[in-house]
Image (cartoon, rainbow, N blue to C red):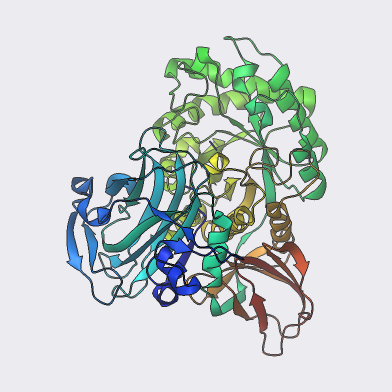
C-alpha cells in the first residue's frame, strides 16, 4: 500500500429534486440565495465559492486525443440547467484511464481541510451500444506527487439519452493557490461516447463539514424501494475469512505489536496475517543478516501469529541501498539481475530464521505492488526470471514458501500483470494464490474486477485481496479514521471485491496503527471496526458466496450460505438516502437476526425482524448511508 472520495451517485430523477448544482440545491431547499446553503440547525446561509472559471468545461482542450483516436465537440442540450455539454468520442482502448483526460486548473484558493462539493451530469454509451459510458473525476495537485483529494468513477444510465447527475462531496487534502490544483476528468475507459455538462466545484471552506454535505445530499435523495433477489443455491467461492496486515516494523517500529494490533487480535477473528519483511534492516550489508531492531520485531510478529495458528504471508517493501540503489523509500526501483542471487539468499535466510528459530513458517511470499514499484519494481518478465531462480533455492533449504501471483497495487492492473506468470509452465511449481489490492474498488469498472475471477477459475487458484481498503491516500485527509464515511466506504469496497473477484480472503490494511480500526491507545474502536465485525459475522470462514441481483443503481448486496447446514446471511450496503429493501429468495419461515450500522451507531440489533415470511421475503427499512446484515438459519 503506499483516489479518495466521499461520494454518492444520483440518477437524474433524484437530481431533479436537487436541481443542477449544489448552490441551487441550497436555494431550493433552504430558501438561500444562489451560491449559499443554509447550515443544518442554522438560518444563516453559508456562501460557497466557485473553484473553477466559468465555462471551463467547454473551453479547456482535452488532452491525449491521439492516444485513443478520440475527438471532441461541444453539443447543444435541451431540458437541463446547462445549455451545452462536452462530447468526447473515443475509438481505441488505452492501458490507463488518464490516456485521454481534461485537466482544468483551479481559479480560486483552496485551504487544507476545506469542504468542497463537485457536481456534473453525464450520459452516453460504449461504442457497441451495449454498455454504459464511464469516466472519472479527480481533484488533485497539478504537480508531482499529484496529491488527490478525491477520485470518483461514474457511469452513465443504461439509457444513453438519459442524464445522470453525480454529486461528490470531499475534503481538500492540501492547500493550493490558484492553479496549483486541478479538476481532472478521465475518459479512457475503452471505445465510447460520453457527454459531460454542468460541471461545478464549490468550496464551502470550514463553514460546513464534508459529513454535513454528504448527509444533506443523502437526505434529499432517498433510495426509495429496492429489491434484492437472493439465490442461495447458486454459490461461488468458499470464504477463508478476514485477516489483516501487520506492518509497523516496516515503518520503523522496533516493537512487534502496538495497542491497535493487540486489540484487533483479541476482538476480531483473524484468519490470516500479512507481515512485512524489513529487508533493508535485515541485510544492511551484502551477506550480513541481523536479527535486531525492526527485523527482530517482524520475526516476533510471525512468532505470535504462528502461536495463534494464523497462517502467514510475508511481503517486502523497502530493500537495502546496496541492493536496490536510489534513495530510501524511493518508488519504482529495479533490482539488477546480477543481484538476484543475493536478494534471494537474503529473503531465504529470513524465512529460514522465521521457521527454525521462531517456529513461524511462511506460506507465501511477495514483493509489495511490484507493478507500481512500492518499492521493488518488476515487469512480469523480470518477476518470472526472479521466481525461476528463487523457487529452487527455497526448495533446497526445505522451505515450502511459494510466491503469490501479482500482489498488485490494484485490481485493474492485475490481469495484465498476472497472466504471463500464469501462462509460464516453468513457474507452476512455485506459484500460490492470485493476489491483488482493492484500492481502486470504488473507481474501477465491474468488468476489471470480474476478470480476476475468470483468471482464478481458469487456473484453478484461490483469489486473495491482501490489502483491502478503499483509498490509498486517505492518510492525507484530516482525521478520517473515526468517520462514518470511512466505515461505509470500507463496506462498499469489501462487498464489491467479494462479489466480483471471487476473493476468498480479505486482509485489511492494516490491523495496526496505519489506517487503524481502533484509537491509537487501543481503547476506542472506530465505526469501521464495528462494520468489520458486522461483516465478519455475516461472512464467516467456510461460508460460500451466493448470487444476488439488486434492482436500481445505488444499493449493494452480498449473500452467503453456510458453513453450517441451514445457515445464511445477507449484507446490504446503502450509500444513498433512506429507503426500503425487500429481500426475496430466502428460506421460508427461517429465523433471522438483523443488525444495523449507520452514522448514529453501529451493530445495533433491529427489533421486530425475526422471521422470513412464508413467501421467502424480508423487508428492511434502510436509513441513509447504512450497513445492514441479516443472519439466518432454517
Q: Relative to residue 9, is residue 508 depicted above or below? A: above
Q: Residue at x 75, y 63 (%)?
A: 603
| Residue closer to the observer: 376 or 357 | 376
Farthest residue to the front: give it.
44
Q: Residue at x 43, y 23 (%)?
A: 334
Left or right of residue 365, residue 336 in this image = left
In which quadrant of the rendered view does residue 364 lie? top right
Image quadrant containing the N terminus? top right
Q: Position of residue 279 (x, y in %)?
A: 60, 21
| Residue closer to the observer: 400 or 287 | 287
Q: Evaluate whether residue 387 shows in this view.
A: yes
Q: Position of residue 92 (x, y in %)?
A: 23, 53
In which quadrant of the rendered view does residue 523 lie? top right
Image quadrant containing the C terminus? bottom right
Left or right of residue 352, residue 286 in this image = left
Disc tally is 0
Q: Position of residue 147 (x, y in %)?
A: 44, 38
Q: Position of residue 250 (x, y in %)?
A: 63, 27
Q: Residue at x 52, y 14 (%)?
A: 321
| Residue closer to the observer: 580 or 319 | 580
Q: Relative to residue 441, is residue 467 depicted above or below? A: above
Q: Relative to residue 518, is residue 190 depicted above or below? A: below
Amino acid at each position: 500500500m503506499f483516489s479518495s472520495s466521499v461520494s454518492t451517485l444520483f440518477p437524474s430523477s433524484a437530481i431533479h429534486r436537487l436541481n443542477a448544482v449544489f448552490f441551487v440545491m441550497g436555494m431550493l431547499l433552504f430558501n438561500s440565495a444562489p451560491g449559499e446553503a443554509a447550515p443544518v440547525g442554522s438560518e444563516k446561509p453559508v456562501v460557497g465559492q466557485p473553484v473553477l472559471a466559468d465555462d471551463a468545461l467547454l473551453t479547456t482542450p482535452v488532452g491525449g486525443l491521439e492516444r485513443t483516436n478520440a475527438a471532441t465537440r461541444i453539443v447543444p442540450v435541451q431540458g437541463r440547467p446547462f445549455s451545452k455539454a462536452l462530447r468526447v468520442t473515443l475509438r481505441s482502448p488505452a492501458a490507463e484511464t488518464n490516456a485521454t483526460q481534461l485537466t482544468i486548473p483551479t481559479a480560486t484558493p483552496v485551504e487544507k481541510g476545506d469542504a468542497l462539493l463537485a457536481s456534473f451530469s453525464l450520459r452516453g454509451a460504449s461504442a457497441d451500444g451495449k454498455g454504459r459510458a464511464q469516466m472519472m473525476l479527480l481533484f488533485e495537485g497539478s504537480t508531482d506527487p499529484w496529491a488527490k483529494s478525491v477520485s470518483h468513477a461514474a457511469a452513465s444510465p443504461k439509457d444513453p439519452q438519459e442524464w445522470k447527475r453525480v454529486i461528490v462531496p470531499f475534503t481538500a487534502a492540501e492547500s493550493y493557490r490558484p492553479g496549483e490544483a486541478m479538476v481532472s476528468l478521465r475518459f479512457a475507459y475503452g471505445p465510447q461516447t460520453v457527454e459531460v455538462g454542468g460541471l461545478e466545484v464549490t468550496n464551502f471552506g470550514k463553514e460546513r463539514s464534508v459529513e454535513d454535505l454528504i448527509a444533506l445530499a443523502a437526505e434529499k435523495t432517498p433510495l426509495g424501494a429496492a429489491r434484492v433477489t437472493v439465490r442461495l443455491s447458486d454459490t461461488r467461492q468458499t470464504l477463508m475469512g478476514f485477516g489483516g496486515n501487520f506492518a509497523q516494523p516496516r515503518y520503523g517500529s522496533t516493537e512487534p505489536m502496538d495497542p491497535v494490533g493487540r486489540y484487533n487480535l483479541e476482538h476480531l477473528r483473524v484468519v490470516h496475517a500479512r507481515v512485512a519483511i524489513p529487508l533493508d534492516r535485515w541485510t544492511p550489508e551484502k551477506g550480513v543478516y541481523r536479527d535486531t531492531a525492526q527485523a527482530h520485531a517482524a520475526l516476533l510478529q510471525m512468532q505470535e501469529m504462528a502461536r495463534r495458528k494464523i497462517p502467514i504471508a510475508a511481503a517486502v517493501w523497502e530493500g537495502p541501498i546496496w541492493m536496490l540503489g536510489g534513495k530510501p523509500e524511493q518508488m519504482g526501483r529495479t533490482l539488477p539481475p546480477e543481484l538476484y542471487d543475493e536478494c534471494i539468499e537474503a529473503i531465504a535466510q529470513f524465512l529460514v530464521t522465521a521457521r527454525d528459530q521462531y517456529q513461524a513458517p511462511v506460506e507465501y511470499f511477495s514483493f509489495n505492488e511490484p507493478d507500481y514499484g512500492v518499492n521493488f519494481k518488476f515487469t512480469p518478465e523480470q518477476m518470472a526470471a526472479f521466481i525461476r531462480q528463487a523457487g529452487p533455492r527455497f526448495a533446497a533449504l526445505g522451505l515450502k514458501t511459494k510466491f503469490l501471483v501479482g500482489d498488485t497495487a490494484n485490481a485493474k492492473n492485475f490481469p495484465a500483470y498476472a497472466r504471463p506468470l500464469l501462462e509460464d509452465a516453468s513457474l507452476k511449481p512455485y506459484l500460490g494464490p492470485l493476489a491483488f489490492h482493492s484500492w481502486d474498488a470504488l473507481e474501477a469498472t465491474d468488468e476489471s474486477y470480474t476478470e480476476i475471477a475468470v483468471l482464478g477459475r481458469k487456473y484453478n487458484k484461490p483469489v486473495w485481496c491482501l490489502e483491502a481498503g478503499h483509498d490509498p491516500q486517505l492518510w492525507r485527509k484530516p482525521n478520517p479514521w473515526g468517520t462514518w464515511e470511512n466505515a461505509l466506504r470500507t463496506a462498499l469496497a469489501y462487498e464489491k471485491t467479494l462479489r466480483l473477484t471471487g476473493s476468498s480472503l480479505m486482509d485489511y490494511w492494516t490491523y495496526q496503527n496505519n489506517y487503524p480500526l481502533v484509537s491509537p491507545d487501543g481503547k476506542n474502536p472506530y465505526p469501521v471496526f464495528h462494520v468489520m465485525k458486522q461483516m465478519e459475522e455475516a461472512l464467516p470462514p467456510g461460508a460460500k458466496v451466493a448470487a444476488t441481483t439488486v434492482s436500481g443503481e445505488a444499493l449493494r448486496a452480498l449473500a452467503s450460505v453456510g458453513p453450517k447446514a441451514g445457515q445464511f446471511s445477507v449484507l446490504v450496503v446503502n450509500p444513498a438516502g433512506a429507503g426500503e429493501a425487500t429481500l426475496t429468495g430466502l428460506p421460508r419461515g427461517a429465523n433471522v437476526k438483523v443488525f444495523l450500522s449507520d452514522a448514529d451507531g453501529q451493530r445495533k440489533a433491529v427489533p421486530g425482524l425475526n422471521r422470513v415470511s412464508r413467501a421467502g421475503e424480508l423487508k428492511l427499512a434502510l436509513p441513509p448511508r447504512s450497513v445492514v446484515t441479516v443472519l439466518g438459519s432454517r
